[in-house]
Image (spheres, helix red, strand yellow):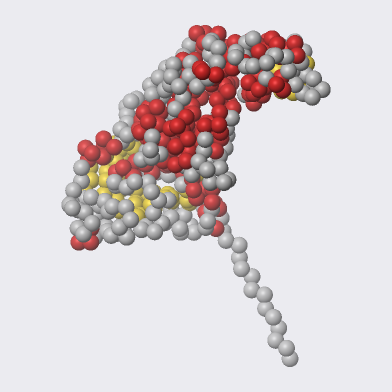
Amino acid sequence: MSERPYLRLVPEPLPRPDLRRARRRDVVVYRVRAHLDDSDPTIWRRLDLRSNLTLDLVHQVLQVAFDWTDSHLHRFSLGGGAFDHNSQLFLCPYDVDNKEWPEDDDGLPAAETRLDETLSEPGDVLHYLYDYGDNWELTLRLEDILPAESDCSAAVVVDGERAAPPEDCGHLVDAESLSEVLSDPALFEPERVNKGFGDAYFVLREAGIDTRLVDLVHRLTYAQYGEDLTKAALTLAGTRPLDTAAVADNLRAYQWFLDRAKDGGIPLTNAGYLKPAEVEEASKVVPAMDDWIGKHNREAQCYPLLRFREGVQSLGLLRKHKGRLLLTKAGVVAQRDTDRLWEQMAGRLIPKSDETFDAQATMLMLAFAAASAGSELPFDKMTALLTELGWRYTDGRSISQSSLRQLPVYDVLINVTDQPATQAQRTIISPAAAALARRALSGN
């Protein structure tokens, strides 16, 4: 009699629990004790943290508090350890994008989770893992809930003991072992830690600057020209937006297209270009056309004008329909209101995808433009920083200035001006263009 085969059923893994709390309606200060698990004697920090901080910012706070350099991956967890099946996970950007472990499928982005969604009442615990090789595990316990002043800092270290183990030392947690890699394992300097909370990362986050730029500044801190980028980005903090009534003349070319399209749209040729009469008129108002050679009556032969017109479309102000350029809904509003035109342009300058070349190059260009009113854009610094980020041509060559000049944001910046954008002046940023760059990066 032949053996009968048996089919063993493997149950589907249960989904991870949702352990998040509701966000608080008010902002308070959480007094949190963070200690390094298994350390002997205990290495710990007591921190006052604003309850509305997102976990990606809490991560940076812990990096400063424990003297680490953000050189490795990290994650937070509720209900257990960072790889326990019954834990709820909050993942760093790399883990969100790559999901190398099946259990990460249910993980939430730490950048979209607030501290008060993980800690609610004194005694609540949040776990943090940094460096999946050395495995530095911190336990964060909420000790007290304190009132928050209107101008309270994001983070303050109140107390603590002992120096944290340095990066890449192999999970040394006892005093005897740490004495081999630290000159003074008992040393803890709260003043230095609190000074670290005043670094560019925290200043820019507190100022509401676009977090994508803040992350780039942080990643490029020690790169060639990283200090120049940091200085440029810091000019964004505390700056007031420019009164758009004062820059109306700088938007004249954009307004011309909107006004022209108001009644029935702008007719196009069968090939989809502006007609010769429109080209001649538009060439008089688009700054980058000022010294363009040849006759200004064929859009296909007027490259700066063609780029400009396509830019107006990419900004969501015009659309093609049945052989005409028509106002979009946003364009209808912008045509009547300079403030709305300004906001529409600022809101559409940065590509939505974060990790593409265009997005990162746009961020760098806007940061330098914001600090370059009346000055030239530093193309050499931007190309060097993009190379540091790993961008190269397919043949291995470093990024050149020409790639930056092809960015849609570049055409916007050189044409937001009340002066001709001649070839000699085309890299000089007008005060209005610098203000538009600041608005685009404000993160509001």
Q: Residue furthest front?
A: 294
Residue 395 position within the rendered picture, expressed as x and y whole percent measured from the top left: 57, 46
Residue 405 position within the rendered picture, expressed as x and y whole percent measured from the top left: 56, 28
Q: Nearer the viewer, residue 440 or 303?
A: 303
Residue in the picture at 55% in, 12% down: 420
Q: Nearer the viewer, residue 120 or 336?
A: 336
Residue in the picture at 45% in, 58% down: 83
In the image: residue 148, left or right of residue 347: left
Residue 31 placement: quadrant: top left
Residue 425 in sight: yes
Residue 33 position within the rendered picture, expressed as x and y whole percent measured from the top left: 29, 46
In the image: residue 76, left or right of residue 182: right
Q: Nearer the viewer, residue 72 or 151?
A: 72
User: How many numbered circles are shown?
Assistant: 0
In the image: residue 385, left or right of residue 353: left
Residue in the picture at 29% in, 47% down: 66
Residue 226 position within the rendered picture, expressed as x and y whole percent measured from the top left: 38, 35
Q: Nearer the viewer, residue 368 or 63?
A: 368
Q: Quadrant of the N terminus?
A: bottom right
In the image: residue 301, left or right of residue 220: right
Residue in the picture at 55% in, 39% down: 356
Residue 21 in sight: no
Relative to 239, does residue 19 appear above or below in the rendering?
A: below
Q: Residue furthest bottom?
A: 1
